[in-house]
Image: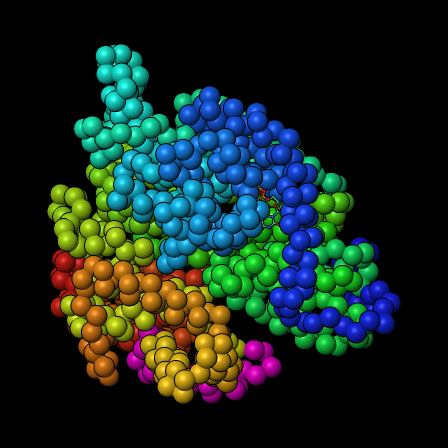
Amino acid sequence: MPSMASSKVNDGENSSQKPQLNGKFTEKHFRDGDLARRKLIQQQRKSLPIASVERRIVEEVRKNDTLIIVGETGSGKTTQLPQFLFNGGFCLDGKVIGVTQPRRVAAVTVAKRVAEECGVQLGHKVGYSIRFEDVTSSSTRIKFMTDGLLLREALLDPLLSKYSVIIVDEAHERTVHTDVLLGLLKGVQIARSRSTIQQTNLNKLKPGGETSDKKDEFLSTSSLKPCQGEKVSPLKVIIMSASLDARGFSEFFGGARAVHIQGRQYPVDIFYTFQAEPDYLDAALITIFQIHGEEGPGDILVFLTGQEEIESLERLVQEKVKQLPEASQKIFTVPIYSALPSDQQMQVFKPAPPGSRKVILATNIAETSVTIPGIRYVVDPGLVKARSYNPVTGMESLIIIPTSKAQALQRSGRAGREGPGKCFRLYAETEFGKLMDATVPEIKRCNLSNVVLQLKALGVDDVLGFDFMEKPSRMAILKSLEQLLVLGALTDDYKLSDPVGRQMARLPLDPIYAKSLIVASEFHCLEEMLITVAMLSVESIFYVPKEKQEEARAARKSFASLEGDHITLVNVFRASTECLEKSKKANMKEKSIEKSLNKWCWENFINSRSLRHARDVHSQIQGHVQQMGLLVSSCGDDMLQFRRCLAASFFLNAALKQPDGSYRALASSQMVQIHPSSVLFRAKPECIIFNELVRTNHNYIRNITRIDPLWLPELAPQYYAAQN
Ligand code: CDP
Ligand code: MG
């Protein structure tokens, strides 16, 4: 690529064909090729690097209780290994092979792919289970799930007795759940092998022979003790990683064996910009169209930091496509990110119609979690959204930071899977040298309240003594214990409280949100809080296109509440419910109901993808709280009551206005500012609670409600009475 900074765009291939559709493919496109597709899939499976070592790997799993498998992305680890083990007899007696993924999208898309490869209906032999969505049945033998979900299962079944094998996939990502899971699985393995020993050969068990002191220590701090007479076979644990360094995992599992799968990687040419790009979205846009104009066939993968960014680049590309001559309009976008509704996720795998080019706009999910065929070009702005935690203030925030070198290499590698490729890094070459070698494990940079609550619920009372692969700082653990104490999840001697702590642990939400639902049932506004929590779980409900900012603002005004963003979100949700009910009353078919909701979203500048996701989450959490026997009632229009409930729930995130118009967060004394997207941006009330801290060049807070400062000592005396 001669000059990446120029915005010149060529006409592309000379073709007189009518332009292909700009958006999605028709179903027919695929049904026509059903048989051909089956054949193609079998061919693809056979040609994967892992295919030639099937027997050897199955043998290794038989011989070793713990195995580490290292292999480049796309070598077939995730899709093939579970099938190898199934065929190798690891599911006898109805046992299940569990595969954990750090990301929901990966669990879903991979399960769909494996079901297709096996020629079975999803949810039967092959299924998936993620928070708020369970597509498994009693006949499921290969189960994909998020690592967080398996942790939750361990609450009910501490020995994970239905599993014969647990595959911890994408372990190199070192998400907080992966790290906790590794510690937990180590304990489960010991407990299960003990139980087997007790079962099969009690006489042979020598004191201190099978279990080292260290293992005993772990067991004594947890509830992982096999019940008398319970029959469980040993648990096989397989750790899969795309990073070459297996040492850490191997050491943690007492010198576990590691095997490497030879990858197949074509050369990838790397290009850098001459200097730093001030607007990387614009630079990405220019690069996409330069590739489209000047380079040969092949799809483009662009790495972005989140849904909002993906959607704005999606719009920019679509606008620019319209300006191209008709013949070169054969380029279209497909997004992929975690909160994408699952029916849309698979679009990314569908091949581009012949002669056209697909531009995949992805978060770091496409780094290693999902392998998308057809990519020849990678555009990498070199950034990633990450959690960051300050243990002194106890505040967690989201920040956009440079990727590590390892991530940059993974990203460029995506271009060389099927042939030589090109990667365009939108930063200067000198910057690459300054990147960190690898990402810091998430457990060292997040709020640990969730982890601590889960461990407590699993019976691990001594959290500081838990066998973490990499120990988080003592201060971070203590801060979380303190937070859980003021939330009422722990008793004064730091034991899980009953019922509050136990209920909080059962809800698949951050402790502060779980608690807010319990508080809300006491304030008789659980209906409003359910909506709030669901709406807060999605990235952007409002849609503000650049060219229609005024209209979008006016539309938002019709939902806005002077009291703040939470009630504004409740108003949007309620209005969408009204729209749905109207359609249902008119006896519309399901497709038409959905269409009219989409139309309503469009007219009101609401992001329909996000709204649908929030509605899904809402119905799922509602199911949970109903099961728990919480009272779901509404405070109707008594928003004072609801605001008091918000104050009672989110008192840890209260802030007071300062003379200069900024705010001081009371718990941390940190100075913060109201984000321009908040309905309270101009009003600037005296005292507020907020839900999110986003650090850019400012410490911005988002999702804010006005409260009365006197409510704090009244509603959270355990925190504010002691402080003032
Ligand atoms: O786990 P690993 O990165 O080693 O590879 P994988 O996810 O098992 O993917 C193996 C191959 O399956 C990839 O090369 C993709 O071409 C294909 N695949 C696909 O076409 N559709 C999916 N949903 C998942 C994988
Ligand atoms: Mg994989």
Q: Name the outermost residue toward the front.
A: 35
Q: Is residue 117 left or right of residue 14?
A: left
Q: Which residues are magenta?
A: 545-568
In the image, 609 versus 220, the foreground residue is 609
Picture residue at 33% right of the left edge, 67% below the top: 619
Picture residue at 68% right of the left edge, 58% below the top: 33
Q: Report x, y in % for residue 420.
A: 76, 45
Q: Report x, y in % for residue 642.
A: 23, 75
Q: Report x, y in % for residue 180.
A: 36, 40
In the image, 193 versus 507, the foreground residue is 193
Residue 494: say if magenta.
Answer: no
Picture residue at 43% right of the left edge, 27% below the top: 66
Q: Report x, y in % for residue 101.
A: 46, 46
Q: Is residue 590 above or below residue 448?
A: below
Asked whether residue 278 is in view, the answer is no
Q: Give the quarter of the image for residue 538.
A: bottom left
In the image, 708 versus 1, the foreground residue is 1
Q: Is residue 186 left or right of residue 76?
A: left
Q: Is residue 56 above or below residue 121?
A: above
Q: Give the quarter of the image for residue 545.
A: bottom right
